[in-house]
């Protein structure tokens, strides 16, 4: 089935995987960018959009008339906190309004850091306990988009691919090149999720009857230290004696135990929630 897919944040890390994936699956795609214009090679239609601009959002969505909006735009990367919060919260309000206006399905990308990491094994029903401004804004965005009834809210963990370096890997690489030592934390627990899993899950959820929150994460629980070391090895980044593994400093705002219960997603989706080792070994076999 060919779908009309409207992707906000086509220029995001995840968007750079989602846009080509949806096109390769034979769908019509319109993707948005804000400050990072995509190259013509990306394909599909694209539109520059500030998702805080209600009229422009409605105009873009009404003119494309999507079957599904995949809302990826607005992460913790912004010029300042006010801009981050407004992009996440006002953006969510405008996107949900536009989805309702055209009567399409909405897939909203949230995050595991709506939880503070003091408990672990959080379910879709667990109360949000955001540890910082980004987590609070994303938790608020979840409330905003859930007012529209044809919505799925995906909560991923750390997102990675083996084709494009993720931001943490870029940070590790550039720090080491500059001779700076880096600490990878042994007590921060995550379910890193491969971009391929998220792309496939979004495609499946585009026509799935499920509405509500869904934990779409990798099926393998890992410390950020183990995950970071694995990525460094994959990308051939030499440690140069500059990498230490350590416990999180007591005053740091980063959540520790962020293991998500993904049993609901495993039950309702055909998409496999591959763990990090499975993804790496599948790629080694192909490459
Ligand atoms: N990366 C992760 O590990 C991770 C983990 C959990 C959840 N998530 C969630 O997954 C989604 C994608 O994350 P990401 O890391 O791939 O994002 P990212 O690379 O940080 O990119 C952020 C995107 O938001 C767009 N954007 C920001 N402000 C905007 C505005 N006011 N109007 C329109 N677009 C705006 C940016 O456009 P320009 O670049 O064109 O300005 C860019 O496409 C986000 O919702 C994030 O919260 C990410």
Image (cartoon, helix red, strand yellow):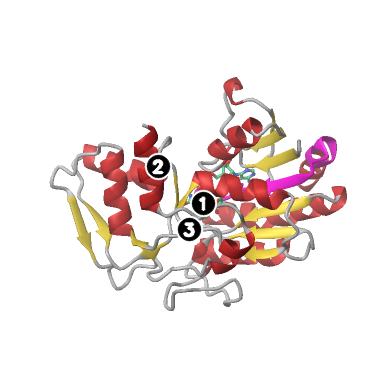
- Secondary structure at badge 2 equals helix
Disc marking residue 157: 3
Residue 16: x %, y % from top left: 54, 36
Residue 119: x %, y % from top left: 44, 78
| First to last magenta residue range | 60-80
Position of the C terminus by quadrant: top left
The picture quadrant where one finds residue 280 is top left
Position of the N terminus by quadrant: top right
Q: Is residue 135 above or below residue 197?
A: below
Side (left or right) of 251 relative to 53? left
In the rendered structure, which disc, 1 or 2, sits on the residue that comes first in sequence?
A: 1
In the rendered structure, which disc, 3 or 2, sits on the residue that comes first in sequence?
A: 3
Q: Is mark 2 within 8 Å of ligand 1?
A: no
- Secondary structure at badge 1 equals loop
Q: Name the residue: 45% across, 60% down.
A: 219
Residue that mark 1 sits on: 80
Q: Name the residue: 26% across, 50% down.
A: 229
User: In the rendered structure, are the residues bearing label 3 and label 2 in contact, judged by CB atoms less than 8 Å apart?
Assistant: no
Q: Name the residue: 47% across, 70% down.
A: 131
Disc marking residue 282: 2
């Amino acid at each position: 089935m060919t779908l009309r897919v409207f992707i906000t944040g086509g220029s995001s890390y995840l968007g750079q995987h989602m846009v080509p994936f949806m096109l390769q699956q034979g769908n019509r795609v319109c993707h948005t960018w804000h400050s990072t214009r995509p190259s013509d090679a990306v394909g599909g239609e694209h539109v520059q959009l500030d998702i805080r601009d209600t009229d422009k959002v409605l105009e873009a969505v009404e003119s494309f008339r999507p079957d599904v909006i995949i809302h990826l735009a607005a992460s913790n990367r912004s010029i300042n906190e006010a801009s981050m919060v407004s992009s996440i919260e006002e953006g969510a309000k405008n996107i949900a309004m536009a989805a309702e206006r055209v009567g399409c399905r909405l897939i909203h990308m949230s995050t595991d850091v709506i939880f503070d990491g003091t408990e672990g094994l959080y379910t879709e029903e667990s109360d949000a306990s955001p540890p910082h401004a980004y987590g609070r804004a994303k938790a608020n965005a979840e409330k905003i988009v859930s007012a529209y009834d044809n919505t799925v809210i995906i909560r991923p963990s750390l997102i990675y691919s083996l084709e494009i370096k993720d931001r943490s890997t870029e940070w590790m690489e550039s720090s080491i090149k500059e001779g700076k030592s880096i600490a990878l934390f042994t007590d921060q627990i995550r379910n890193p999720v491969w971009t391929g899993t998220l792309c496939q899950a979004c495609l499946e959820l585009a026509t799935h009857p499920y509405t509500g929150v869904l934990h779409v994460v990798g099926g393998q629980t890992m410390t950020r230290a183990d995950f970071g070391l694995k990525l460094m090895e994959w990308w051939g980044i030499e440690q140069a004696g500059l990498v230490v593994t350590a416990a999180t400093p007591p005053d740091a705002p980063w959540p520790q135990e962020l293991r998500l219960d993904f049993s609901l997603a495993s039950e309702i989706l055909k998409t496999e929630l591959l763990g990090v080792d499975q993804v790496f070994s599948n790629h080694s076999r192909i490459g």
